[in-house]
Image (spheres, grey):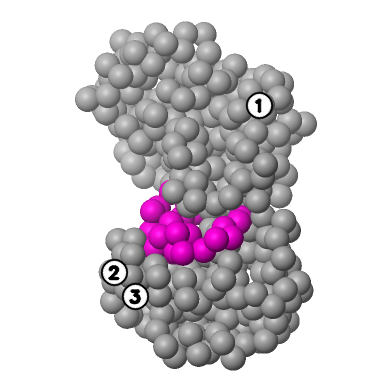
Amino acid sequence: MPLKTVRDIDVKGKRVFVRVDFNVPLENGRITDDTRIRAALPTIRYLADEGAIVVLASHLGRPKGKRNEAYSLAPCAERLSQLLGKEVVFASDCIGEEVEQLVARQTPGSVVLLENLRFYAEEEKNDPDFAAKLARLGEIYVNDAFGTAHRAHASTRGVADHMQVRVAGFLMQKEVDTMGKALSAPDRPFVAIIGGAKVSDKIMVIENLLTKVDRLIIGGGMANTFLRAKGLATGKSLVEEDRVETARELLAKGGDKILLPVDLVVAAEFKADAEHKVVPADAVPEGWMALDIGPESARIFGETIRTARTIVWNGPMGVFEMEPFARGTFAVAQAMADTEGVTIVGGGDSVAAVEAAGLADRMTHVSTGGGASLEFLEGRELPGVACLETKE
């Protein structure tokens, strides 16, 4: 069922508690990437323009339940003020009488940003009393933080129990609708690309997707475990020995659906300047390690991707952070950019890869949630989504 959103309710003059994801990278107190703040702007602007009193709540980093000024959200308030072109009131705490009075003094259209929720250990514990204190700051609950929707924390789950109106922001709606359609009613052919280092991180994703996709491409370090499962020598490549049998079972279950690399870029050492060469997937030399898919694999994968109508990508094809081993990942990104189908990129490394390739703006959807998008692809219920109202 589609989620109810801020557009489906009357917010005029109401205090609206909005969970956003302002967990941005900081260096010396300065924001180095404001993507997550920008992603929340449509919801914040809409609510303010409709006359709501907007109360924003977020975490930042891992302050371990204690006040630590290095993790203050003050720089986010300053940046948000610049982006909105209006003052954002920064609260020095996220609960308590002073904060309640500060919010009570605001007029329709005002925007308040609370201090870091994780300055309290009760946030991650989903403490009922802490959730109740947060709930005093709003009459309506909006979750626009897909990146934390897989966490049952006080601000993502507990506070919703205290609000009769619980809806999604525009970012949350886009994430859930786009990925939900891909999994439930995709345009076909539907191709999934799964990469990254470990099979163990993505067993449930692969099992879930195998029941839905037409082709499943596997690359990255995890491909080595599948190649070993086929009886191939893998040299010094990363292999999860305790997952070889699981990989064998998945290969049997997937049959012709699963595409593995046919050639690999191997290196003598795990270094950017290491000696490296292209070898067939069944000819990895002893003492060498696979760090990328080879050019023939990139070509085959690219052809499969370009003919697809829906493509979901989670995980790089190699160690793309090192230039000699980035070509496979960038080839996948280019193939996705070239297709006319729906292209969805989820997971931190895949997002970093399409940005490094300069192709992020050519994807249909680049997810803001790493762990959340992974759990969504596994078919698991996300607590921060399940507590929101759906349309009849």
Q: Dot 1 surroundings within 10 Å: few (below 14), some, or many (20 or more)?
A: few
The crowding category of the residue bearing disc 2, from other C-alpha atoms within 10 Å (few below 14, some 14 to 19, many at least 20), is some
Q: Residues within 10 Å of mark 3 (few under 14, many from 20)?
A: many
Residue at figure coordinates x 39%, y 29% from the top left: 204
Name the residue located 76 percent from the left edge and 72 percent from the top edge: 50
**Above or below 192: residue 281:** above
Q: Which stretch appears magenta?
A: 147-168
Nearer-the-camera pick, 205 or 221: 205
Q: Is residue 109 magenta?
A: no
Residue 257 position, x and y percent, is 53, 13
Q: Is residue 173 left or right of residue 151?
A: right
Residue sticking out furthest to the front? 164
Q: Indicate the amino acid at tag 2.
A: Ala
Of the numbered discs 3 and 1, the one sitting upstream in the chain is 3
Disc 1 to disc 2, C-alpha distance: 40 Å
Q: Is residue 165 magenta?
A: yes
Foreground of the two, 347 or 94: 94
Q: Please provide percent x and percent y for residue 18.
A: 56, 67
Mark 1 element type: loop
Residue plotted at (50% across, 24% down)? 209
Q: Quadrant of the N terminus?
A: top right
Q: Is residue 162 left or right of residue 224?
A: right
Q: Secondary structure at mark 2?
A: helix
> Considering only vertical position in the picture, is 91 above or below 311?
below
